Structure formats: C-alpha cells, structure tokens
Image (cartoon, rainbow, N blue to C red):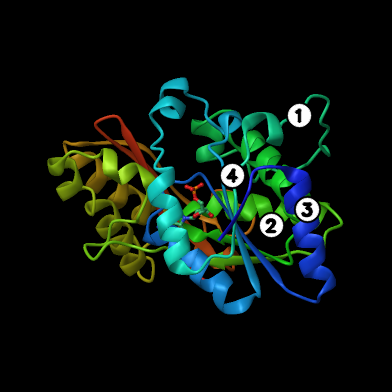
C-alpha cells in the first residue's frame, strides 16, 4: 500500500492514474477502522481500479472537545486492515496539510438538510463535515466517492454538496454494516462497557419495530411508540428520534405525501453517543 502525507504527492499520483484511464475510488474515514469501513473499501475495490482511503480525525466537525480527544486512534491496526483488504493508497495528512492558512470554500446552501437531527444536536457539525469532505475531494479528485448510510444525513448533505460543485464524482451510498446482534458498527462501540454493549442492539430492534409498524400506523404513532420504547430502557438517554423525508430530511406528518421515509435516532449509553437509522420507505 502506498502511503501519502502530502497533498502534492497524492495529487501527482492520482493525476497519473486518471491519465491512464483508471477509476479512482475514495473512502474518507476518521480511522479506528472496523468492518463497516471495510465494507466501503470492498465496494470501492470491486468497482474501481484504485482505492484511496483517507484517515483524518477532523477537528472542525467535533462540537465537543472531549469527544475529539477521546476519539479512538488506532493507526497501526488500521494500516494492517487496509493492507489486508488490498487498498492501494492511504492518505494520512496532518491538520496543517488539510487546513493550510488562507484556504477558501464555496458557500454551500444545504436548504435545511443540515438543520434537524445531527444538525440540531451537534451545532457546527455539518459545516465541519462539508468543509473537510470538500477539501479532501479537492485533493483526491476521485471518480467515485463511497459513503455509508450509517450517517444518512451526512450522505445526503454530501450529495447536495456535489450537486453544487462542478465535479464529476459519483457518490455511492453503502449499506449499514452491523454486528451479528444488529448493532451498527461504529468506532465508538469499543468505548462501550460490556453491559452497555449488551443493551446497545436494542436501538436497532426499536428501529426495526418502527419499520414493521409503518404499514399500519400513522407517522405520529410510529414515532411515539419508538420514543416510548427508547425511554423505557434505563441505560439509554435518547437524543432524538425522527421520521423524516429521505430527500429533504424534513419532518413528515403524512406518509402518503412522501416518496421516501427514514427513521433516524441518536442515543447516549452512559456518555457514548450512538446513531443509527432505518429506511422505512425507499425511493
Ligand atoms: P467515520 O470514520 O466514522 O467518519 O466513517 C467513515 C465512513 O464510513 C462514513 O461514510 C460512514 O458513514 C461509514 N461507516 C461508518 N460506520 C459504518 C457502518 N457500520 N456501515 C457502513 N458504513 C459505515
């Protein structure tokens, strides 16, 4: 695996690959890699010629300094995982490399996509995400970008960002990879105590119940049931549970008026914040 730390070296390499007619797949990550990340790599390896993974814990998307500090960093293990998977390129930039002085960004308008859910509960988060993804895409200029449905709102915002810039990049939404008990894989799962880890799959079970109920109940009823179930679990502190339109990410009251529906939730177990979602109605 080739390892690049500098923008100009990576750019030169990718330019060469693209001139040779190769498709370049890009998987941006914050490291602490797990099988969820590897499922994105696998899709990129399968459908493109060169897979570039970046590992960069982006300080600008953390609204909580403690969360940034405690974010797991396992670079040696990450490198072994990427090499074993057959990823060809790792981009491992410093904060200074990603954010040199006097960098400018387009003024994106996400038309409310960034207001609810993570946007409401983590102020500034999506500005940071859009900033870093824009910057990384500007450096890598891939043909294909792979992002996980695990972060549904993030995926939708990046889709909107790509519609606003003049780059020919195909965005691929990859399904949520889960542990056998249903818990969505996340770098934060390693911070769960054994007891918390036992209870965490209930998040997925409650989302699945919402999916089962959506045929017969109103959106309000499905939401109330889910909130009640989440609140009933003592170890959980629900941050939000929302049922939104899969495109506009706005709250939906009447399910007959929308083409796609997604239930999204964020739950604290002790002080670990986990997010998950389920598509209730696909486009
Ligand atoms: P992160 O390192 O958390 O920023 O995640 C990097 C990418 O991996 C994002 O596109 C995430 O949506 C994706 N990802 C994280 N966890 C999962 C998962 N369990 N299943 C699928 N994709 C995931």
Location of residue 105 in the rendering, given as x and y in whole percent from the top left corner: 81, 36
Asked where in the image residue 267 lies, by quadrant, the reply is: top left
- Nearer mark to the viewer, of 1 and 4: 4
Residue placed under numbered mark 3 in the picture: 11
Q: Earlier in the sequence, mark 1 or mark 2?
A: 1
Query: Quick one: SS at disc 3?
Result: helix
Q: Earlier in the sequence, mark 3 or mark 2?
A: 3
Asked whether, in this view, residue 25 is left or right of residue 16, the answer is left
Within 10 Å of the Cα at label 4, are there few (<14), some (14-19), or many (20+) other Cα atoms? many
Residue placed under numbered mark 2 in the picture: 159
Query: Quick one: SS at disc 4?
Result: loop
Quarter of the image that includes the C terminus? bottom right
**Residue 106, placed above or below residue 212:** above
Q: Kindly give the residue lying farthest to the left in the view shown.
A: 195
Query: Residue 100 shows which numbered tag?
Result: 1
Query: Quick one: SS at disc 1?
Result: loop
Location of residue 124 in the rendering, given as x and y in whole percent from the top left corner: 60, 29
The one of 209 and 62 positioned closer to us in this rendering: 62
């Amino acid at each position: 695996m080739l390892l690049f730390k500098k923008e100009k070296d990576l750019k030169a390499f990718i330019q060469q690959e693209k001139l040779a007619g190769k498709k370049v797949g890009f998987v941006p990550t914050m490291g602490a890699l797990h099988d969820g990340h590897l499922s994105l790599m696998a899709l990129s390896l399968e459908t493109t010629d060169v897979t570039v993974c970046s590992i960069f814990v982006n300080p600008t998307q953390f609204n909580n300094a403690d969360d940034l500090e405690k974010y797991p960093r396992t670079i040696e293990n990450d490198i072994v995982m990427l090499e074993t998977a057959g990823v060809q390129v790792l981009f491992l930039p410093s904060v200074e490399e990603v954010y040199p002085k006097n960098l400018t960004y387009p003024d994106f308008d996400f038309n409310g996509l960034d207001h609810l859910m993570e946007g409401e509960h983590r102020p500034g988060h999506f500005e940071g995400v859009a900033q870093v993804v824009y910057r990384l895409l500007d450096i890598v200029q891939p043909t294909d970008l792979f992002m996980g449905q695990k972060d549904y709102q993030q995926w939708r915002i990046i889709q909107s960002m790509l519609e606003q810039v003049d780059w020919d990049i195909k965005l691929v939404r990859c399904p949520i990879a889960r542990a056998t008990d249903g818990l969505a894989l996340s770098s934060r799962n390693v911070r769960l105590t054994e007891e918390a880890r036992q209870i965490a799959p209930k998040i997925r079970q409650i989302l699945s119940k919402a999916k089962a109920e959506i045929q017969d109940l109103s959106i309000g009823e499905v939401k109330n049931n889910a909130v009640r179930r989440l609140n009933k679990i003592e170890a959980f502190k629900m941050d939000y549970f929302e049922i939104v339109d899969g495109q506009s990410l706005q709250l939906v009251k009447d399910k007959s008026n929308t083409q796609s529906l997604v239930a999204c939730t964020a739950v604290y177990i002790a002080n670990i914040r986990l997010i998950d979602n389920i598509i209730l109605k696909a486009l």
